[in-house]
Image (cartoon, coloured by chain):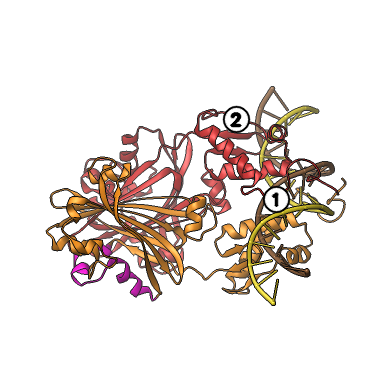
Chain colours: A red, B orange, C yellow, D brown
DNA sequence: GAGTGGTCTAGACCACTGA
DNA sequence: CAGTGGTCTAGACCACTCA
């Protein structure tokens, strides 16, 4: 099949930056400049083919780039829509201050109020579960031991931004009925644990950033391989016991993390 | 042009998972399983075309996926090589313990020793610089004010993993000649600052993950849009003054962060 | 059912690498 | 120079969305 480069510009020719990158940049610029506003539809691929006078595959690659910028969300039979600019949320280590719990605010809602965004929590599952290996190790129990799992999905302005799974040893939770409820009451589950004599000394958070898997991307409505933050938090009591492990996965573009590290020994 | 689906499996047909994803997964599995070891070349694209009996474009897309996994590095006229598995480095907030500084170890080398990897630091620039806006704000000086900048590039096993830029107000550094040296001596620059009466109360770290820009990707030898961690650290003294801001950019696949958060108020 | 994105093919031409 | 990855085309067929 004799094609393409008989007419027009040379294919991979003396051009430094590929055509599809140029096109992607132009589209991204239009969004940043406000020519395309949040909620607007990006022109359809066939329309872009016409406008730029290139083949469909080229537009296709350009749109992959545009999606990678995170400014756009594409849905199959519909098209691409310019996303609301994610007003990032500060996730401060201060959210674990004991006074917040005594003040009756759960960490999540306490923060959302500050930034003035609509927050929603959807409970996916609360109940017994066999502890996965990594969680079991952190809780100091054997793999497969029954623990209480609390899986939630957090929304912000209607879009899912975070999945969180808490795991607690059964002997810790069995006498605390609130921990089996969707809403554990003022101050959240940490406040309930404190009510029952579990005094915390520290929380240990471990984070890692990596590209989202396909499954994670669809759950958080991200473009595949957009960065996500995987965070594991151990809640440690005075006895040195880990009474909760919280495993959360976040859309990286939605969060900024802040930690205050005491300089004294 | 009548094509493809006259023979073999249907194109986008009743198949749930696209062929290129299947192929990508197979290749990734081979790497994870050790069939392809670190340093091995992945078969060339034309070889894969033959082996899987698909068109070049399909293999091409599969390889994009494989690259996104971060297990492979592709170079133009050469091919794709299986990367050394990044032995991730734990970046613990404990590295700022005062006892480490008094013990004479700089934070970076103190940690590298633990994990037994070859570390190298390359100094890119040490000298005066006009403070960029965000840095100036954190230091509490006007934008454009002269500050001391210390730009370094950190290597691990020969590959660059982190760029770090420290900024210090000029009045703080002008009497501390060690801060102008490539090697500021035992305990690093924080130890020198303490020697000169700057007692630290805390360090505040702010992190965000995002895809690397093209420029950052090339500086850190990453595939473009691989995730990076952008970390800003303020060093706060007893007087409440920020005497250093450290701006670092890290290849996300090389680091795990750990923070201990005191539960008491 | 018209329109949109998603997958795939077959083939051309280019740029880079290394013997 | 031969071999490899990178860009591009033109066109087919599919699945999803929505009126």
Inspect the magenta stretch and tell me whether residue B95 lies in it. yes
Q: Position of residue A10 (x, y in %)?
A: 73, 46
Kindly state the secondary structure of the residue where label 2 is placed. Answer: strand
Q: Is residue B31 left or right of residue B11?
A: left
Inspect the magenta stretch and tell me whether residue A113 lies in it. no
Q: Position of residue A236 (x, y in %)?
A: 28, 60
Q: Position of residue A184 (x, y in %)?
A: 33, 44
Q: Is residue B116 above or below residue B96?
A: below
Q: Is residue B253 left or right of residue B68?
A: left
Name which of mark 2 and mark 1 comes first in the sequence: 1
Q: Is residue B53 above or below residue B4?
A: below
Specify whether residue B23 is in view: yes
Mark 1 belongs to which subunit?
A: A
Return the residue at label 2: A41
Report crowding for label 2: few under 14, some 14 to 19, many 20 or more residues within 10 A (C-alpha): some
Between the C-alphas of marks 2 and 1, the distance is 30 Å
Give the residues in magenta.
B94-116
Front-most of residues B161 and A254 = B161
- Which numbered disc covers residue A12? 1
Quadrant of image for the N terminus of chain B: top right
Q: Is residue B64 above or below residue A256?
A: below
Q: Position of residue A142 (x, y in %)?
A: 41, 69
Kindly state the secondary structure of the residue where label 1 is placed. Answer: loop
Mark 2 belongs to which subunit?
A: A
Specify whether residue A184 is in view: no
């Amino acid at each position: 099949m004799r094609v393409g480069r008989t007419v027009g510009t040379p294919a991979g020719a003396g051009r430094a930056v590929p055509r599809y990158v140029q096109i992607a940049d132009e589209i991204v610029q239009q969004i940043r400049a406000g020519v395309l506003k949040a909620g607007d539809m990006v022109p359809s691929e066939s329309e872009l083919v016409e406008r730029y006078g290139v083949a469909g595959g080229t537009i296709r690659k350009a749109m992959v780039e545009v999606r990678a910028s995170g400014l756009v969300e594409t849905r199959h039979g519909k098209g691409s829509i310019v996303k609301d600019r994610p007003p990032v949320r500060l996730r401060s280590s201060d959210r674990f201050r004991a006074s917040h719990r005594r003040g009756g605010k759960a960490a999540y809602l306490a923060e959302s109020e500050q930034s003035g965004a609509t927050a929603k929590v959807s409970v996916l599952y609360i109940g017994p579960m066999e502890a996965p290996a990594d969680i079991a190790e952190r809780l100091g129990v054997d793999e497969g031991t029954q623990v209480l799992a609390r899986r939630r999905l957090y929304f912000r302005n209607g879009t899912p931004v975070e999945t969180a799974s808490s795991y607690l040893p059964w002997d810790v939770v069995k006498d605390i009925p609130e921990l089996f409820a969707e809403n554990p009451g003022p101050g959240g589950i940490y406040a309930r644990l404190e009510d029952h004599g579990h005094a915390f000394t520290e929380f240990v958070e471990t984070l890692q950033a990596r590209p989202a898997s396909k499954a994670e991307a669809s759950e958080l409505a991200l473009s595949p391989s957009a960065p996500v933050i995987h965070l594991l938090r151990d809640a440690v009591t005075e006895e040195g016991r880990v009474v909760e492990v919280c495993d959360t996965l976040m859309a990286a573009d939605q969060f900024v993390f802040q930690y205050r590290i005491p300089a004294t020994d």
